[in-house]
Amino acid sequence: MQQLVFATNNRHKLEEVSAKINGRFELLSLDDIGCTDDIEETGTTFRENASIKSQYIYQKYKLNCFGDDSGLEIDALNGEPGVYSARYAGGHGNQMANINKVLQNLAGETNRKARFRTVISLIWNGEEHFFDGTVEGSIRTEPSGNDPFGYNPIFEADGYNVTFAEISLEEKNRISHRAKAMDQLIHFLSTLS
């Protein structure tokens, strides 16, 4: 079975992607290949940040790999938090602080239209390929659900009356931004064999 490195140690992302890949490849994390480096995301777009991750791994380890960058774009906030989604409130990964900042910035706002966006950069045998996925929706006025990851507790996808934190992993893997980008990646990989 061919190995494919996902340039992350985020267990939540690894579970989502592993479910999508469904045994087609041996999915490896940064931990699995012994990479403890902090790959700094210095790009100003999702595409640049995804590319930084995959290029770093490919240059250093010469393994087929992909990196992603994802975030929440809110129309009324001119696309914020965007590439700064994980550190919107300052520190990296303080999810409740990020959610609270979004809710505070949207207080009194009637336009709550938003989308999650993912860009994947795959480097396969030295060539880079990009895949994009989005899911449209809106921002709730308060968090709900049991999945505290990212902005899931305040994001409601179009056509649903529950947040991303309230739907099953299986359902999320069917409709999410990462799922859509992963479907394109998997389709591309299936054309190689």
Image: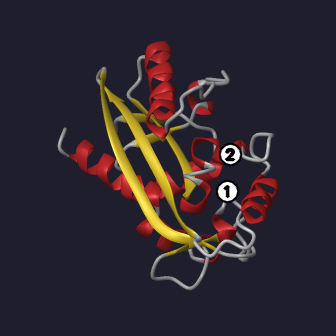
Residue identified by numbered label 2: 86
- The colour scheme used here is secondary structure
Q: Which disc, if any, is residue 150?
A: 1
- Cα separation between marks 1 and 2: 7 Å
At mark 2, the secondary structure is helix
Quadrant assignment, res 127: top left
Query: What x and y, as percent, mark residue 166?
Result: 63, 77
> Is the residue marked by circle 2 packed among few (<14), some (14-19), or many (20+) residues within 10 Å?
many
Query: What x and y, as percent, mark residue 124?
Result: 31, 28
Query: Between 66 and 93, which is closer to the camera in this rendering?
Result: 93
Inspect this view and state whether residue 163 appears.
yes
Badge 2 amino acid: Ala
Position of 125 with respect to 116 (left or right) is left
> Is the residue marked by circle 1 packed among few (<14), some (14-19), or many (20+) residues within 10 Å?
many
Quadrant assignment, res 159: bottom left
Query: Between 66 and 160, which is closer to the camera in this rendering?
Result: 160
Q: Do the residues labelled 1 and 2 touch (CB within 8 Å)?
A: yes
Query: Between 154 and 170, which is closer to the camera in this rendering?
Result: 154
Residue at image position (37%, 43%) is 25
Badge 1 amino acid: Gly
Position of 154 with respect to 75 (left or right) is right
Position of 90 with respect to 186 (left or right) is right
Query: What x and y, as percent, mark residue 13?
Result: 57, 50
